[in-house]
Amino acid sequence: MKTLTSLACLLSAALALPAFAQDYTLRIAHTNAADEVQDKGLQKMRELLEAKTDGRATIEIFPNGQLGDEAQLVEQVMLGSLDVAMTANSTISNYITDYRVFDLPFLFPTIAKLNTVLDGPVYGMLEDSANDTGLELIAVYSSGIRHIMTKEEINSIDDLKNVKIRTMQNPIHVDAFTAFGANPTPLAYSELYGALQSGVVDGAEGAATNYTGQKLYEVAPDFAMVGWLNMTAPVFMQKAAFDMLPEDIQTAVLESGRESADWQRQYVDDQEKPLLDALVEKGVTITQPDPAPFQEAAVPLYNAMLETETQQALFDAVMETPTN
């Protein structure tokens, strides 16, 4: 099979006839553990893509940061040395700035609300924003609803005062935890377990999926169910490379992406309760702080973070989507 490895190779191939061999393998990388919910979505995408193309196209998955951290994966895709990447929205929104809207706290209270939004005109707006940045949006997966893991119980927003919380390297996340009274500490995801273990940070924010998958409960055994963010994980490709695929393969890639995302987001929703039950069995203390003070503290971020007309239009479209 022929693997798309660089834009230079693609452009060289375009000068020859035929432009591509019969078969296509897209290399896709991410930083989550193999068989975590995000990886499961990619496995589903591979299954669908192979079925839709009668085996002419497939994807090769590189999980767990094998090819670099998330920022490195974005850069590789933009340079054409990696075909496809999946990152946290908070990472890709540093490049596709319109996506910062999806980083706003408490925007999607449930996976069902997120599904409804992505089934409407918002998805087309996300595609346009990606294209404007030289990327092609393939899918929007879920990384689950994010809570707070710590070494000591968090029973209210007051318990977060001056607590060192690891956040993603994203300004909205940093500002959100500053608003919550914590001491946000941006760190790469790969450094989190060691940082918790050594005391560099006292806790972190995250979903039950990665809390379980990375065994973070071993070093932060308290889990406060705040639901501060419904994290998405876009899957994207360099647009120039995507446009050089035959139309039928393009269609199959986009259809497989959307359909696998529908399946994956439902899978995430179905997994949360069993994951929480399993965490309790592992000795994790789960608390339920009142979310209202967190929500009130986050309100000023909305106006501060909507910097462009496009971001405001995307935010308005999200808010105008009716909840089922």
Image (tube, rainbow, N blue to C red):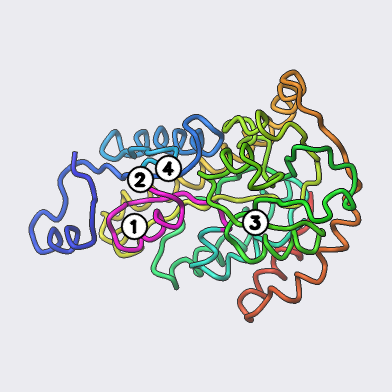
For marks 4 and 2, give the CA distance: 5 Å
Callout 2–callout 1 Cβ contact below 8 Å: yes
Give the residues drawn in magenta, as a range: 67-90
Q: Is residue 93 left or right of residue 306?
A: left
* Mark 1 lies on residue: 76
Mark earlier in primary sequence (1, 4): 4
Which picture quadrant has residue 194? Answer: top right
Q: Position of residue 135 (x, y in %)?
A: 41, 64
Q: Residues within 10 Å of mark 4 (few under 14, many from 20)?
A: some
What secondary structure is found at the residue carrying circle 4?
A: loop
Which amino acid lies under the numbered mark 1 shown in the image of this protein? Gln
For marks 2 and 1, give the CA distance: 9 Å
Q: Residue furthest left?
A: 16
Q: Residues within 10 Å of mark 2 (few under 14, many from 20)?
A: some
What secondary structure is found at the residue carrying circle 1?
A: helix
What secondary structure is found at the residue carrying circle 3?
A: strand
Q: Residues within 10 Å of mark 1 (few under 14, many from 20)?
A: many
Which amino acid lies under the numbered mark 4 shown in the image of this protein? Gly
* Mark 2 lies on residue: 67
